[in-house]
Image: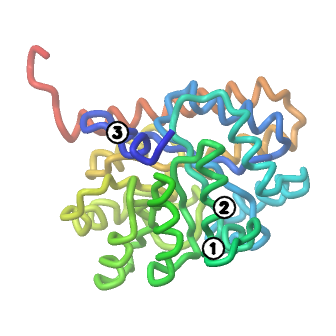
């Protein structure tokens, strides 16, 4: 799929559900089943975490998932094979850290990094990137490579992002904006809707879809975030916790996949419920 497919995942009247899982957690085969279960459960796009040894933006839940994936042998090249082996029909976003993009592959004379990584990602079927540690001021080479291969570059906007920096982030972004519902790292222990309306109001002038993440763990929180004005929800830790529990209790891959699909349906249904609260259907429709 191309970057334009990622943009179309955000339909005007159907809020997008964008789940996240760390690829290879706890094994290559199980992880594939889990990602495919999320697609079956209603995901409109899926963020695939490429494990990196220093995941500074992640909370303990996702950090532990990354450790499990690295212990199971996940590497950038295995990640691309994973994407190629997936049987899903939704856009896929690679979420990782810039060091992996910068160090990947050989660079020919005159060629700039991270072009080789982006070229390989496009070949595998990736539609875009989220790179939490990449400052907007240094995003030029990645933006150029994404433009060359038709991929999107998604930026993360925090409640404290200052206006000048926000303009820079939007300038290099495409696909959607990843809006942090609160400060801190990923996790589900704090409500997501606390500052969502305020953050979204601040972003209203920008045409890019706004997907809110951090702290969404069920259908009602999903509904609240969409009612507050979001175009989509991003959910990671609540799903990763299901994978972690299955690993710790030695549950079957099928049982864990079923639980992931069930939560995915709840989240997608909740998002739609939130949209109906915000934009009630005309009587008789």
* Mark 2 closeness class: few <14, some 14–19, many ≥20 residues within 10 Å: many
Q: Is residue 7 above or below residue 158?
A: above
> How is the protein colored in the picture?
rainbow
User: Residue placed at 70% from the left, 72% from the top?
Assistant: 108
Q: Is residue 254 left or right of residue 3?
A: right
How far apart are the alpha carbons under marks 3 and 2?
A: 31 Å
Check whether the beta carbons of the residues at disc 1 and disc 3 lie within 8 A of each other.
no
Q: Position of residue 109 (x, y in %)?
A: 68, 77
Q: Is residue 28 left or right of residue 13?
A: right
* Mark 3 closeness class: few <14, some 14–19, many ≥20 residues within 10 Å: many
* Mark 1 closeness class: few <14, some 14–19, many ≥20 residues within 10 Å: some
To which quarter of the image does residue 274 belong?
top left
Query: Residue 15, which numbered label?
Result: 3
Sequence-first tag of 1 and 3: 3
User: Residue placed at 23% from the left, 63% from the top?
Assistant: 206
Residue behind mark 2: 117
Check whether the beta carbons of the residues at disc 1 and disc 2 lie within 8 A of each other.
yes
To which quarter of the image does residue 158 belong?
bottom left
Q: Is residue 229 above or below residue 164?
A: above
Query: Residue 143, which numbered label?
Result: none
Q: Position of residue 277 (x, y in %)?
A: 23, 37
Residue behind mark 1: 113
User: Residue placed at 37% from the left, 46% from the top?
Assistant: 7
How far apart are the alpha carbons under marks 1 and 3?
A: 35 Å
Marks 3 and 2: which is nearer the front? 2
Q: Position of residue 262 (x, y in %)?
A: 59, 27
**How many discs appear?**
3
Q: Is residue 269 above or below residue 9?
A: above
Q: Position of residue 271 (x, y in %)?
A: 38, 38
């Amino acid at each position: 799929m191309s970057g334009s497919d990622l943009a179309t995942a955000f339909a005007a009247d159907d809020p997008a559900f964008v789940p996240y899982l760390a690829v290879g957690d706890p094994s290559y085969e199980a992880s594939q089943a889990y990602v495919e279960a999320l697609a079956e459960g209603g995901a409109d796009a899926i963020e695939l975490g490429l494990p990196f040894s220093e995941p500074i933006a992640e909370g303990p839940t996702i950090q532990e998932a990354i450790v499990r994936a690295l212990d199971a042998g996940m590497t950038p090249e295995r990640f691309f094979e994973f994407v190629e082996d997936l049987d899903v029909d939704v856009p896929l976003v690679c979420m990782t850290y810039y060091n992996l993009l910068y160090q990947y592959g050989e660079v020919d004379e005159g060629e700039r990094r991270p072009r080789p990584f982006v070229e390989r990602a496009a070949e595998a079927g990736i539609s875009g990137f989220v790179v939490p540690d990449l400052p907007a001021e240094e995003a030029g080479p990645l933006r150029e490579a994404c433009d060359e291969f038709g991929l999107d570059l998604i930026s993360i906007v925090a409640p404290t992002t200052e206006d000048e920096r926000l303009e820079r982030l939007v300038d290099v972004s495409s696909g959607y904006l990843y809006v942090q519902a609160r400060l801190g790292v990923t996790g589900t222990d704090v409500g997501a809707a606390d500052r969502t309306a305020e953050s979204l109001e601040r972003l209203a002038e920008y045409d890019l879809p706004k997907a809110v993440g951090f702290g969404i763990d069920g259908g009602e929180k999903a509904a609240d975030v969409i009612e507050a004005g979001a175009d989509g929800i991003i959910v990671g830790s609540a799903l990763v916790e299901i994978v972690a529990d299955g690993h710790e209790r030695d549950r079957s891959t099928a049982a864990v996949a079923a639980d992931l699909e069930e939560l995915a349906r709840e989240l997608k249904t909740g998002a739609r419920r939130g949209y109906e609260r915000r934009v009630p259907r005309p009587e008789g429709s």
